[in-house]
Amino acid sequence: MTNPSDPVRRRSTYDMLGLLRAAFMPLRHTFAASLSVLGNGAQSAFARHLDGGYDPYTGNRQAGEGIRIRNLSVRYGERYAIEDLTGEFAPASLTAVVGPNGAGKSSLLRALAGVVRPAAGEVICAARARHRLAFLPQQDELDRGFPITVAELVALGDWRNFGAVREPPQQLAERVFEALAVVGLPSVADRQISELSVGQFQRALFARLLLLDADVILLDEPFASLDESTSADLLLFLRRWQQEGRTVIAVLHDLDCVRQYFPSTILLARSLIAWGDTSLALSVDNLARAQKALVSPQHGSMGRVA
């Protein structure tokens, strides 16, 4: 395995991250000159106004960063993906979202992340309002052909701390190297993301999550198409994030994995079947109810709206 502190590889990554700085330099200089007449507090407030993604981390992780949902419904055209869902993800909880195909699992995560607007009800999430929520969609929703290196992909996880009009911090390259080493990818920093295997790409996305340093983390099928070893490695991050006080919610299909690793589970079939302790939520009766609910006359055929 290549040493992550190898000077040639480290220099290559520093060069690539330097491109990020260069791209923003003209605008940054103009912006800095304009702000120089303001005090520190006014500069920060004005920067946030011009760049909604800028929200640097300035203190300890806040308590109470869970999510509450009230009478939540999500609809695509005339078809409901989720109907009248109410409940709460407790702070620092680790919750699996399961259900048959078409149950509304991915739609729930998109609503929590603010990617889709509810047809009814509301999502109450302080972390999202403070740009401290991370959402990792399924891999097939991501453009693997985009011309970006692994290091650049991971570095953009720190976007909140410099935004579109500030220079990336000097220590960013070091943090990128550390994150890639932690996820087991110390030797691919200068490769294009299109060159990575499915497992390597997912590890790189987890490295990006490390730099995001979010209080709430939403993962849609994070272990799909991964080998057993990669899945086991990445599962450790979910446990670590929960132990650090983060709220973690993941859509999964592997019920054995859910039973082994997730204390809490939501079982969906467009409407709520069960929510709570995993051993109770995934009872034989509840799983049968979920399957039956999606083929009832009320819901029509199962389809794939999730």
Image (cartoon, rainbow, N blue to C red):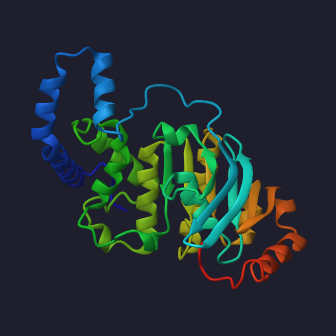
Residue 101 position by quadrant: bottom right
Is 113 situated left or right of 5 in this image? right
Comparing 295 with 199, the one in front is: 295
Comparing 63 with 192, the one in front is: 63
Q: Residue furthest right?
A: 285
Q: Could you tell me residue 126's position as x and y percent? A: 56, 37
Residue drawn at x 76%, y 54% as measured from the top left:
264
Q: Could you tell me residue 154's position as x and y percent? A: 35, 53
240 lies above or below 197: above
Residue 222 position by quadrant: bottom right
Residue drawn at x 25%, y 62% as measured from the top left:
148
Q: Could you tell me residue 204's position as x and y percent? A: 40, 60
Q: Could you tell me residue 210's position as x and y percent? A: 46, 47
Comparing 289 with 121, the one in front is: 121
Viewport quadrant of the C terminus? bottom right
Residue 276 position by quadrant: bottom right
Is 95 situated left or right of 32 in this image? right
Mark yes or no: residue 184 visible.
Answer: no
Residue drawn at x 28%, y 54% as measured from the top left:
152
Comparing 139 with 124, the one in front is: 124
137 lies above or below 79: above
Q: How many marks?
A: 0
Residue drawn at x 60%, y 55% as measured from the top left:
236
Is 19 situated left or right of 139 in this image? left
Viewport quadrant of the N terminus? bottom left
Mark yes or no: residue 107 visible.
Answer: yes
